[in-house]
Image (cartoon, grey):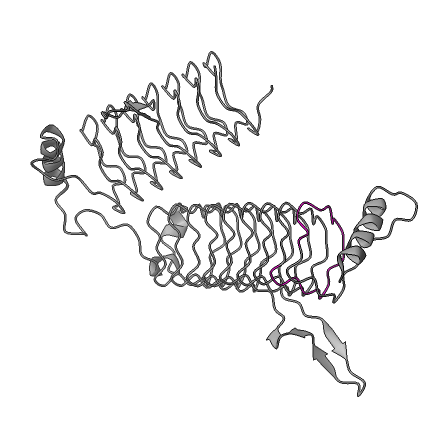
Amino acid sequence: MSQTELLAIIGKHRAFLTKQPGGVRASFKLRDLSHMDLSGLNLAEADFSGAKLFGARMVDCVLTGASLYAADLRLANLERSDLRRADLRGACLRGAVLNQASMAEADLREGTIMHVRKDGSITPHEFDDVPVQTELSCATVVGADLSRAKLSNTFLVQSDLTDCIMRGAKMARANLTNTNLTGCDLKGADLTGANLTGAKLHGADLTGAELGLARFAGALMMGTILDDNARRAEEVLEGIHAPTPEDAGLDLSAMLVLHSEWVETGGREGARADLSSLDLSGVDLGGTNLSAALLHCACLRKASLVGTSLPMADLSLADLRDADLSRADLRGASLERATLNGAQLVRADLGPVLIQSSTGRLWSANLHRARLDGANLTGAMLKRAVLSQSSLVGAVLKDAELSDAKMAGADLRDVDLAEADLDGADLADAVGMVH
């Protein structure tokens, strides 16, 4: 297709969308648009059935309700594109880039285009001898919204779905072997019969998900958020879970003593505590000095951390649901993608810490994409804290210090911000804020 022909079709499609005279819905059925640049165009409801879009550039493209049935989108760049309610049945997206794309309610179930030959035989449509099937293998889909998307029987092998929102997605019998689902929101998703062998599920939220007959053999599930019933399910037990210190052959008390020596001597004696990927549910660590400790993917559900010293500690992807962190020192700590739903953080210090160097740099606490739904942060110090894209639905932030906090894209629905200091806070694209 020439650029002139493409522009003419787009012009008529623009008129079609605005209901102007001469408007015609864009049709690219079975056309070859490989490597073409369609970035930024509004192609909502356009027909790309069976089109070849190999390596096409479609960044920030509006494709709402478009038909991409059995389209060849291998290696296509669809970053930040709007594919809500798009028909992607039978599409091939192998190696495609879909970072931050909006794909809510998109249909990615199986589907093929059939040709009736002159002799009356019916054969499937193919591109370069590659069978047309719904495929997202080796694709990069970081931070995309796939809420309520239809992905049953979809081939998602070895794809990167980090931080995707997949609430209520239909993924029955989907093949997710070796796929990265770190930090994914899979609440209420249907994973019945899905193959999650070798998948990475650190910090993924599977509460309310249907997991019957799903396969988790070799799946990495440290920090995975599960219902109590799901945690005991036979299917889930096949995965690799966080062991208790005892199961891992570790002496927690001795580790804490050595860590205290390590802190007091500036690292000359003792040993830094590495509690990453351990199950510390319900443990009482109140008042303990865990400065700069490693707690990545640790399970600290209902743990007591009252007054605990955790400055510069790594709590990324940790499960801290219903934990008590009241008056805890979390200055400069990393809580990226951590789950703190229902946690107590009353008067906790999540402010910056001064790095002793020639520049005197302030190191902010990092709560990027953290889940804090229903958490109590009354009187908490969050000055300069990074809360971008975090979820604080129903959280209490009364009298909290949020000056200069980075809260872009945060979900602040039903948050109590009475007397909170938001001076200089970045609230761009924050949900639930009345400006």
| Vertical comparison of 97 with 123: above or below | above
Residue 351: x and y in percent read 34, 22
Q: Locate residue 323, reporting x and y percent.
A: 32, 32
Question: Magenta segment range?
Answer: 37-55
Q: Nearer the viewer, residue 422 or 6?
A: 6
Left/right placement of residue 296 relative to residue 16 reads left
Please state the total of marks drawn on the protein image.
0
Q: Closest to the observer: 102 or 247?
A: 102
Residue at x 28% of width, y 21% of height: 327
Name the main secondary structure of what is drawn in magenta. loop
Does the magenta run of residues contain 159?
no
Vertical placement of residue 406 versus 422, above or below: below
Quarter-wise, where is residue 36 in the image?
bottom right
Residue occupying image coordinates x 38% and y 47%: 224
Identify whether 352 is placed above or below 391. above
On the picture, is 434 further left or further right than 138? right
213, 423: nearer the viewer: 423
Residue 97 position, x and y percent, is: 54, 54
Q: Is residue 90 above or below residue 118?
A: above
